[in-house]
Structures are given as structure tokens and as C-alpha cells.
């Protein structure tokens, strides 16, 4: 058995029985990184020494009889989650040399759970993108076809999990950035309800949309990861003081009585590849065969989601990114004659083209005289999108649809055409605008052997229903067991 190929649950069972040690497991993961990282390019930073020290600590805890589900498990996190022990770049040159003086709450929670932190994963700069090509550091390849994008913005997270370079990972999702790369890399990924997981120490992109969530080799691993990181945090005023259930209790496989809503607007979406539509339709049939009932639902304001998101997200980003001025963090342009010139040069050289594009759009949308017409109007339509979901969930438990209109595209294919790139977010943006949870689980392959994901959404704080449906589907199918040939 290859240790790096284990799921979190499998590794936990072996660690608990002391059939393997965390040091062996962690060593195997680093050997795997040494073997395939030059092809995949998933990591921005990793440290074998640091991880081996944590693994030794975990082995001691296990010897003392303390073996929680994540104790001794090698995990990695997207590089916009603040870590005291690693630099945090957000995939941007502007944060060059910046090491946060504190850990994000999710890091503290993973460490309390006994996890081993392998390193930091590549991403689109400040999480803006759908392909990880906007990283200012490197280009990540899709483990299923290295000439293709892994999705984004958490492309490093999805690629590392798919390529067995960590057992599980955390990403962030502002408009699809966990679900879409999970779909393209054939792994499971969940965007929790807004407020379910603390954003303290998550570098902000669009504060009203951002949420941290897990990526795993299967649904159960995502449930274990969410168990560890979810919950109220007094350091994040948007985290919600609601009890966290044990998400693994939802992994029953029993779908009787579950109603799945199929949004009528989604199958007619522009650019939807017939292979994706047919995989999703087949998945619905599988869910029905397990006892779920299908219902038609309508989300009539879906057509505005891209426009609304691409006003709200850049507006919030333009404000959040004002802090990178060459004074407080990371990169400062060295040869500036005076202050304004230093700001200007630092920001023009430190930020890449997509980030600059969004700062310009966002600054315009928020400017005096335009605020009502753009951000204000977009917020009103956002409320209509939220209400669509509210109504739909009166008649169904979960909504099922595609994650992305196509499978992974070629590196370079859409990079010069931002609008086409934005349109590929059509199925994922609405969940962030509404604040509801959504998950991607593998549901098929194209004729080229590229993974296709199924999206399952539920109402606020109803992650358990998603886990129930996703787990039932996974148990009845084999898509999650297939591995890329690297
Ligand atoms: N693709 C979307 C964007 O570029 C979503 C990114 C995200 O979820 N971080 O904004």
C-alpha cells in the first residue's frame, strides 16, 4: 500500500491501531512531493523539517492515547491563509517576503486537532481567477493532464489533493474557488455556509462572499475537515454562534425522503458542454435510484449572477486591497522619488494584470455618483438571487446542477479573454451571493478522461444534507476512486 494514496479516514484507522506512524506517513507525502511537484507545481512553500517535527509530536500524542480524526494527518492550505511558520503570498508579488505574525483561526484549529501542516498551496493572485493562471508565482498543472488548468482559484489545493501530495487541503471560495478546481481535478470540495468557518487570518478578497472550506479525496474526508475547522470565533464578527454538528453523522448513504431540486434555468446555460450535462443527468438518476425524489425548481435571477458578482467582488476587492501600499507589507518599489510615486510604482509592479483590472472596475463602481447605480443596484439583485433560493428550498432539500460548464481547459486558452473566463463561473457564483453551502463531487469523465463534478447546494447551515446526498452518491459510484496517471 502506498501511504500517500491513503484517505484521511484510512490513514486515521492505521495511525490509531499504530500500524503506521505519522512520521512514516508524512515522509511518504514529502517523497511524493519530491517525485511529482516539478510537473504539478502545486506548492508555493513546504517544509519537511517542520512537518516532521509536528509528525513526531502527533506520534507522541497517539502513543499517549490521543488520536483525533486529524491527528498526525499531513494537510496543506491555500496560500492566503495566514501562517506564522510560512510566508503568506496570496500568489502575489506584492506580498513578497511577508510572513504573518499570527496564525489564522483555521490553522490554530487544525493544529489543535493534531494535524501536520505540509505547506502552502498555489492560487490565482488574491483568489481572483478560475484557472490559477493568475498566480504571480507559478503555473499549476492539472494532474489529469498537465497541459490543462487545475481550475481556480484554489488550483494548488485541488491539484495537491488529486496528486496525493497531501491527504487533504483547505481552500477558499468567493465565487466557486473550492468547487470549480475540485470539479476539474476529480476531488471533493465544499464551500460551507457564509459564517460557518472563521475568516480570521484569511486574507480578504471580497469580504461578503469569502469562505474557507475543505478539499478531500472523498466526501467523508471533507466532513472530518469541516468538523475540525467550523464554528464561532470571537475574532470574526461574521462567524455565526451556532452549534457545529458532527458532520460525519450525515454519512449514512440513506437518501430516502430527500428531495433534489433541478433548476430549470441551468440546463439551458450558454456554453454548457453536453458531456457535462449528461454526466449531471446520470448523477440525478443515481440519486433517484437511491430513494431521492426529483423536483423542478426555478432560479429565475440566475442570468444576472455573473454581472452582479463581477460588480460586488471587484468593489469589495478594491477596498480590501488598498492596504497594499508598499509601507505595511511585503514588496516596496525600491527607486521611487517621493511617496505618491512609491505607492503608484509599488502597486503597478506588485499586482498582476487581473488584480489591477479588478481594482479599476471596483474603484469605478464605488466612486461618488456611481455607487447607487452599480454596487447598490447589484446588492438589490443579489437579494433577488437569495430569495430565489429561499423559495426553491421550500420545495426541495438540495439543489443539484453542474459545477462548471466544461471540463478543464488548456493552459493559455482563455487567459487573454477575461469575459469568457468570468462566464465559466455561472454555476458557482450564486451560492456565494446567497451565502449558502455548495459542494462538488466527482460524477464522470469526458471522452478525454477529464473529471466532471456534480454540484450539490443546500440552504444556510444545512451542510448535513449536502454530505448525505454526496456520500450516498459516492458510495453508489466509482468516479472518486480513479486516480490520475502522473
Ligand atoms: N472565479 C471567480 C473570480 O475570479 C471566483 C474566485 C473565487 O472564488 N475566489 O472571482
Image (cartoon, rainbow, N blue to C red):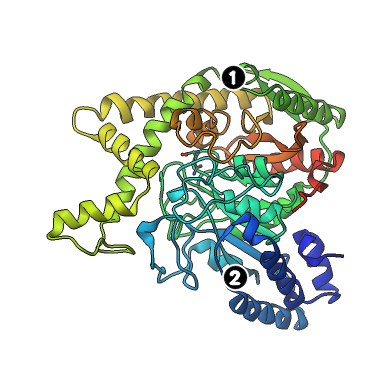
Q: On the image, which quarter does residue 337 sit in? A: bottom left
From the top left corner, tell me how far across and down residue 250 is, in percent.
75, 46
* Relative vertical location of residue 424 with respect to residue 297 in this rendering, above or below: below
Residue at image point 64% right, 63% down: 75
Q: Earlier in the sequence, mark 1 or mark 2?
A: 2
From the top left corner, tell me how far across and down residue 412 is, in percent.
53, 39
State left or right for residue 117 relative to residue 441.
left
| Residue 79 visible, this orientation | yes
Tag in front: 1 or 2: 1
- Find disc 2 in the rendering and name its residue: 111
Tell me the CA gap for discs 1 and 2.
Answer: 43 Å
From the top left corner, tell me how far across and down residue 46 is, in percent.
57, 69
* Relative vertical location of residue 117 with respect to residue 385 in this rendering, above or below: below
State left or right for residue 357 relative to residue 404.
left
Which secondary structure lies at badge 1? loop
Q: Residue furthest left?
A: 338
The label on residue 269 is 1
State left or right for residue 20 relative to residue 182.
right
Which secondary structure lies at badge 2? helix
Counting labels gives: 2
Amino acid at each position: 500500500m502506498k501511504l500517500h494514496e491513503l484517505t484521511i479516514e484510512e490513514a486515521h484507522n492505521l495511525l490509531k491501531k499504530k500500524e503506521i506512524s505519522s512520521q512514516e506517513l508524512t515522509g511518504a507525502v514529502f517523497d511524493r512531493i519530491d517525485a511529482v511537484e516539478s510537473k504539478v507545481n502545486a506548492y508555493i512553500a513546504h517544509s519537511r523539517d517542520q512537518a516532521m517535527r509536528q509528525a513526531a509530536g502527533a506520534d507522541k500524542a497517539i502513543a499517549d492515547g490521543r488520536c483525533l480524526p486529524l491527528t498526525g494527518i499531513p494537510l496543506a492550505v491555500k496560500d492566503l491563509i495566514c501562517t506564522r511558520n510560512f510566508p503568506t503570498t496570496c500568489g502575489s508579488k506584492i506580498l513578497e517576503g511577508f510572513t504573518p505574525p499570527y496564525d489564522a483561526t483555521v490553522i490554530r484549529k487544525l493544529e489543535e486537532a493534531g494535524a501536520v501542516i505540509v505547506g502552502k498551496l498555489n492560487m490565482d493572485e488574491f483568489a481572483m481567477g478560475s484557472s490559477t493562471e493568475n498566480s504571480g508565482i507559478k503555473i499549476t498543472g492539472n494532474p489529469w493532464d498537465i497541459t490543462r488548468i487545475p481550475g481556480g482559484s484554489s488550483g494548488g489545493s485541488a491539484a495537491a489533493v488529486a496528486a496525493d501530495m497531501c491527504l487533504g487541503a483547505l481552500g477558499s471560495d468567493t465565487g466557486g474557488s473550492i468547487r470549480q478546481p475540485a470539479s476539474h481535478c476529480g476531488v471533493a470540495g465544499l464551500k460551507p455556509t457564509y459564517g460557518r468557518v472563521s475568516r480570521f487570518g484569511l486574507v480578504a478578497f471580497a469580504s461578503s462572499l469569502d469562505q474557507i472550506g475543505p478539499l478531500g479525496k472523498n466526501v467523508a474526508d471533507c466532513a472530518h475537515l469541516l468538523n475540525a475547522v467550523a464554528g464561532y470565533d470571537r475574532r470574526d464578527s461574521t462567524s455565526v454562534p451556532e452549534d457545529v454538528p458532527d458532520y460525519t453523522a450525515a454519512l449514512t448513504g440513506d437518501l430516502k425522503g430527500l428531495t433534489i431540486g433541478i433548476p430549470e434555468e441551468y440546463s439551458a446555460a450558454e456554453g454548457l458542454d453536453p458531456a457535462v450535462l449528461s454526466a449531471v443527468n446520470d448523477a440525478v438518476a443515481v440519486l433517484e435510484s437511491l430513494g431521492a425524489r426529483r423536483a423542478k425548481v426555478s432560479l429565475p435571477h440566475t442570468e444576472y449572477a455573473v454581472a452582479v458578482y463581477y460588480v460586488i467582488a471587484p468593489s469589495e476587492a478594491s477596498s480590501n486591497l488598498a492596504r497594499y501600499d508598499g509601507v505595511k507589507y511585503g514588496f516596496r518599489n525600491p527607486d521611487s522619488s517621493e511617496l505618491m510615486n512609491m505607492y503608484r510604482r509599488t502597486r503597478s509592479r506588485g499586482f498582476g494584470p487581473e488584480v489591477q483590472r479588478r481594482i479599476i472596475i471596483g474603484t469605478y463602481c464605488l466612486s461618488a455618483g456611481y455607487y447607487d447605480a452599480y454596487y447598490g443596484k447589484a446588492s438589490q439583485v443579489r437579494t433577488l438571487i437569495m430569495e430565489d433560493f429561499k423559495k426553491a428550498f421550500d420545495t426541495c432539500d438540495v439543489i443539484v446542477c453542474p459545477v462548471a460548464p466544461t471540463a478543464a481547459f488548456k493552459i493559455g486558452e482563455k487567459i487573454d479573454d477575461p469575459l469568457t473566463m468570468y462566464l465559466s463561473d455561472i454555476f458557482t457564483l450564486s451560492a456565494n451571493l446567497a451565502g449558502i453551502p455548495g459542494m462538488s463531487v466527482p460524477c464522470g469523465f469526458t471522452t478525454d478522461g477529464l473529471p466532471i463534478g456534480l454540484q450539490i447546494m443546500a440552504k444556510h447551515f444545512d451542510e448535513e444534507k449536502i454530505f448525505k446526498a454526496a456520500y450516498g452518491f459516492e458510495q453508489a459510484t466509482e468516479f472518486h476512486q480513479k486516480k490520475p496517471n502522473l
